[in-house]
Image: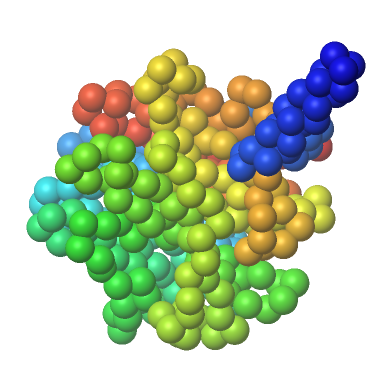
Amino acid sequence: MKKKLFLNVLVAVAVLFLSNDKQYAQGIEYPTLSKSQVVLVGDSGKWDYNKAHTLSVVEANKDGYKYWGYYGLSYYGGDPELRKAGLVRSNDLIHWDKYNGNPIIKSDCRWPTVVLVNSVFYMLYAEYNANNDSRIVMLTSKDGIHFDSKVVIVPREDGKQNQNPFIYYNQKDKNFYLVYYNGIERAKEPSNNIWNIKIRKSKYINELKDAKSKTIMSSRDLIAAPSITFFNNKYYLLIESRVLGKWDNKWVTLGYESNKIDGKYKELDNNPPVLSNGDACAFQYVLDNQLYIFYSHCLDLAKWNWELSMVKAIN
């Protein structure tokens, strides 16, 4: 009888363990990364001073530069005139020249993400109202500098955030994918706050506005800033997180993998996280068959000061 009871307890524990919502890709880690390099900082006394925060990169091969990058600021709430986007260009992904006409988007632009397809630049970013409710819009450009023809892709919802967009063109199925953060951050009862990572796809980028969003991750703890890429025959998802009492209260970047771009993502075994020293807002790209992460490193959380750094896979 005791032996049977013991076996029943073991079975119950096993079932409880296997039914846990949080799944790990056991034995799988994000590729080993190089030492980080600072690649972009704001200029003293200028519009971007200490606020360079996100960097989206495309291979443009224009005007003497192979790579064009679009960077946004860390400013979040308040005056929309503080939220702007600038253009930088490079031939080695380390040394970046700022465009003399910066900022190219002068107001209410946070988190610019750009994809270049068939000689057209598509830029998506978040806009905010007076309550800091956000929506995602898209502009287009033929030269990569002058953007217009604004279209709302993800509309604003009262009391909610739709922001942190990352646009990805998947060569495997020839679809555009938009992954973004959706959530409630300011509920009257904090236990009602929720953070979701959502994705939508479309054969044509202009039809993303009509596509249905699918939730691929949800948490009561802060998760946001997703980016997706395909490398080593798997899809990698990076998200930022910050949980009081964990990771020394710093921002970190967590990694996940899946064999389907809009499928179930399993958290990787990386411990510490993929990026762990006040590092967030990661944009990952495969350029010339090399995996790069461009991310924001926190200089002073109280002042919300950041600089842009880069690491690349070395295996």
Q: Examine the rendered structure and indicate whether residue 129 appears above or below residue 2.
A: below
Q: Examine the rendered structure and indicate whether residue 240 appears above or below residue 218.
A: above
Q: Position of residue 186 (x, y in %)?
A: 22, 45
Q: Nearer the viewer, residue 38 or 301?
A: 301
| Residue 6 visible in the displayed image | yes
Q: Nearer the viewer, residue 88 or 13?
A: 13
Q: Residue 74 falls in which quadrant of the image? A: top left
Q: Examine the rendered structure and indicate whether residue 270 appears above or below residue 227.
A: above
Q: The N terminus appears in which quarter of the rendering?
A: top right
Q: Position of residue 89 (x, y in %)?
A: 48, 56
Query: Is residue 196 rendered to the left or right of residue 185?
Result: right
Q: Position of residue 28 (x, y in %)?
A: 78, 37
Q: Position of residue 77 (x, y in %)?
A: 17, 47
Q: Examine the rendered structure and indicate whether residue 69 appears above or below residue 267.
A: below
Q: Residue 299 falls in which quadrant of the image? A: top left
Across the whole image, how many numbered discs are drawn on residues?
0
Query: Is residue 17 rendered to the left or right of residue 247?
Result: right
Q: How is colour applied across the structure in the image?
A: rainbow
Q: The C terminus appears in which quarter of the rendering?
A: top right
Q: Nearer the viewer, residue 70 or 217?
A: 217
Q: Nearer the viewer, residue 144 or 268?
A: 268
Task: Write the residue at 76% across / 23% down.
Answer: 9
Query: Is residue 288 rendered to the left or right of residue 111?
Result: right
